[in-house]
Amino acid sequence: MADGIKVNEGSGPEVDTIDRGGAIGHQQVTVRDRGMRSYFTTLTIQAAAYSSGDVIGGVFEVPNVVRYPGGTGLITNLIAILGENPGSSLDSFLFGDNPSASTLVDKTAPVIAAADRPKLVAQVGSLFSVSRGGTTFFNYVPDNWNLAVPFVCTGTSLWLVLFVNNAVTLTTTQMHVRLYWEAA
């Protein structure tokens, strides 16, 4: 452990973890173990009013999703955590390449450019909220409790963007997001 960062490297296939300590304060952590992978990050959001359909947190990269360009996989879960209950569900889009021609900025209506539409590889349906002790967890809860959204990366990363489904006013300035997937 150096500088509060603990790194464990295993000898099995694709095993490495990074723990930067803290309960919810982890940032940009990738965990790999037997094909199941996850990525956790903290997004900066505005303590302000969001209109229905606004982007929340902006677009962000999920690096090293697959080993080689053009790799495929399945999204198995997506969780977002807020320190309050905004009374709205969330929707999300996944891009197989950077949607750099689009406007996907926090607290604005999304504008997906024609050049970026072919990069849109998946939509993870509505993330519904559950509040526990002042914290709200957004999770995809399909009828059969099993999420399997296929994706194809242009490079080795995915880009994720979240949207609010209803007008909300937030008082918190951070949202934590964890994406789970299995690479082929």
Image (spheres, helix red, strand yellow):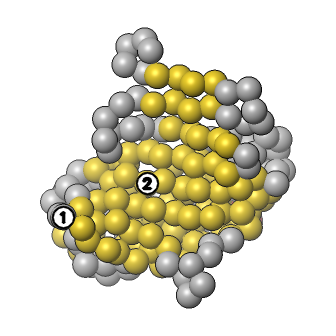
Residue positioned 31% across, 41% down in the render: 23
Q: Identify the element where label 1 is drawn.
A: loop
Above or below, 15 against 172 in this view is: above
How far apart are the two marked residues, 1 and 2, measured between alpha carbons?
A: 18 Å
**Residue found at the very far top of the displayed protein:** 2
Crowdedness near tag 2: few (<14), some (14–19) or many (≥20) residues, C-alpha within 10 Å: many
Identified by mark 2, the residue type is Val
Q: Identify the element where label 2 is drawn.
A: strand
Q: Nearer the viewer, residue 31 or 46?
A: 31
x and y, in percent, of residue 173 in the image:
23, 51
Above or below, 159 against 130 in this view is: above
Q: Are marks 1 and 2 in contact (CB under 8 Å)?
A: no
Identified by mark 1, the residue type is Gly
Q: Nearer the viewer, mark 1 or mark 2?
A: 1
x and y, in percent, of residue 167 in the image:
27, 78
Image quarter where the N terminus lies is top left
Q: Is residue 154 visible?
A: yes
Image quarter where the C terminus lies is bottom right
Task: Name the residue tied to disc 1.
Answer: 133
Residue 168 lies left or right of residue 52; in this view the side is left
Q: Which mark is residue 177?
A: 2
Residue positioned 67% across, 34% down in the render: 15
Residue positioned 40% across, 29% down in the render: 20
**Residue found at the very far bottom of the displayed protein:** 143
Residue 18 lies left or right of residue 70; in this view the side is left
Residue positioned 77% across, 36% down in the render: 13
Q: Nearer the viewer, residue 107 or 44?
A: 44
Q: Is residue 170 visible?
A: no
Q: Which badge, 1 or 2, is on the more N-terminal residue?
A: 1
